[in-house]
Image: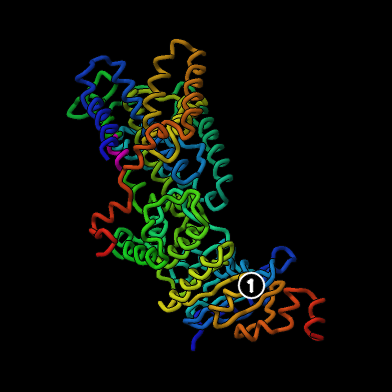
Amino acid sequence: MKKIYIIILIPLAILIFLPAITQRTYILHLAVMSFVFAIISQNWDLTMGYLGLFNFGHLSFFAIGAYTSGILSINFQVSPWACLFLGGLTAMVAGSILTLPTIRLGGRVFSLFSFSFQQVLFYLIRSNPMGLTGGSQGLSRIPPLRVFNYSLQGASSIPAYYVALTLFLGISMTLYYTVKSPIGMAFTAIRDSENYAISRGIDPFKYRFIAVVVGAFFTGIIGAFYAHFLGVVGPEILGWGNVVLTCCMVEFGGLGTLLGPTAAAFLLTTLSNYLSGLEAYRNIIISLIMFFVLIAFPSGLAGIFAPIKTHAPKLTDLIKTRINYGERGEK
Amino acid sequence: MEPILKCENVSKYFGDFAAVKDLSFQVNPGEVFGIAGPNGAGKTTLFNIISNIPFPPSSGKIIFNGAEIQGLKPHKICHLGLVRTFQIPAIFNEMSYLENVLVGGIFGRDFSFYHSNSKLSMDSAYEAIKLVGLFEERDKHPKGVPLFDIKRLMIASAVAMKPKLLLLDEPVGGLNSSEIMQLVELIRKLQSKGITVVIIEHVMTCLMAISQRVMILNYGEKLAEGKPEEVAGNEDVIEAYLGKEYRKYLRTG
């Protein structure tokens, strides 16, 4: 119980006071990018780790959020804050389009469909339909989010850092309580044994749909934030490098743990930025690190913390304390 | 008395092969109804099509509690109170014993946020895990646990759903004789709680001991039905189990 708080509280304190510790824009920029990728990989973990549903198109929700928000705020002068929400909503719609026709056909069909969905989206964005997406140039001059006329663009803006931190913490907490709730229990049940779960009254289609759509919504929101934060967004966010890196964060962090992919997102974002001067060697070094960590801890980064994880409160404990059962389970 | 479960001309075809063929029978409330038959007789297929997990019947009517249920989604059938267990041991590996049972308590009725967290689902889970005698082990994690525990957990999670009718698929298969005795006791307890039980079993002593009525299937068709002692003496049944050769011995000896 105590160790888990140390693991979470110390990094949390560092993150809260980071702008006071260092004024280097580069580090703040890395932190914000880590928040963004942590949220993407957490939401990916929701479908891949908790439900065992291989969604290879998860980054398309990110791209849809970013582009929707960019297009709406550039071409239609919609308020960037509203765009944040609309980006999430559009990603959610995309999530249902991806899920509804395929989810009943089994995991393999869904995986293939999500894979091709992302490819189609990539070429669609590149083809610059109606001059909206800017083709391979991407969108630029996306207006920033504003708080009392403070612009939230670029890492030199400290309010931007705190908005990113708030989004990160808010979405992480929401996901944490979702997987600890009966909904998370249904996810685990479906992953462990689908027919057994059905025979206990769980509708697997409903929960798969919920997981994909909720994941899409949060990923879309953070995509929109990314677009407004950087002011530019290009089709390379759907490029192979980005897809593989993000997928690695989920796998390397440890499937179905949330905390693992978050840690991996921070680690890999930082590493890949610091090593970017080494060009081709960068990927070799990152691969080697992942290789050795996964040999030592086959369940990923979360495996290092596994002895501690068991102390986290379980659903039964949460309910038990509410009802206050006695020592032998008597009321 | 109105039967709790009634199957009318139920069939299941895989291509041309009839796994269950034109089968009709009924189960009365409160009884233990045994189903037996040689391997491949269609016993598990019958449970599959009644519960619609994983497939519905090809034709025929299944009437549960006065309403037709063929064509309903499987989780809806569970919510009506018709619950099954599996022949192949099924368990949620990532959950503790109690959580395994709680799944039935939470999702066994129509799921809503209100009672998912409520006392009702927790109470039924506690009651069920005590009934099967696993209360002391409730916080164990089911990795490499004995088969007996898995079988009891499967029954406990079903009982936590407050079923009206329980379909048990080979609950004592693979267990030793003292474990079989405990499970027989457990099934009697279920019956005394007012749960109607339909049980598939290969261990004939167990089936004969607990069933009020028995149905024997062979090649997807009903071979015999009646009280256990009547069925045990039925020549067709003996032939189905032992082959034609043995029929001669029965006649002469």
The residue positioned 37% from the left and 37% from the top of the image is A307
Above or below residue A280? Residue A47 is: below
Locate residue B96, reporting x and y percent: 40, 52
In this rendering, position of residue B214 left or right of residue B184: right
Which residue is situated farthest in the bottom direction here? B1
- Residue A123, picture quadrant: top right
Instruction: Examine the structure image and report whether residue A171 is included in the region drawn in magenta.
Output: yes
In this picture, which residue range is highlighted in magenta?
Answer: A169-174
The residue positioned 19% from the left and 20% from the top of the image is A20
Instruction: Examine the structure image and report whether residue A296 is included in the region drawn in magenta.
Output: no
Above or below residue B105? Residue A205 is: above
Asked whether B18 or A66 is in front, the reply is B18
- The secondary structure type at the circle numbered 1 is strand
Above or below residue A239? Residue B32 is: below
Locate residue A41, reporting x and y percent: 41, 34
Q: Mark 1 points at which residue?
A: B59
Q: How is the image coloured?
A: rainbow
The residue positioned 50% from the left and 49% from the top of the image is B144
Q: What residue type is labelled 1?
A: Ser
Question: Quarter holding the N terminus of chain A?
Answer: top left
Which residue is situated farthest in the top direction here? A277
Above or below residue A257? Residue A195 is: below
- Residue A171, picture quadrant: top left
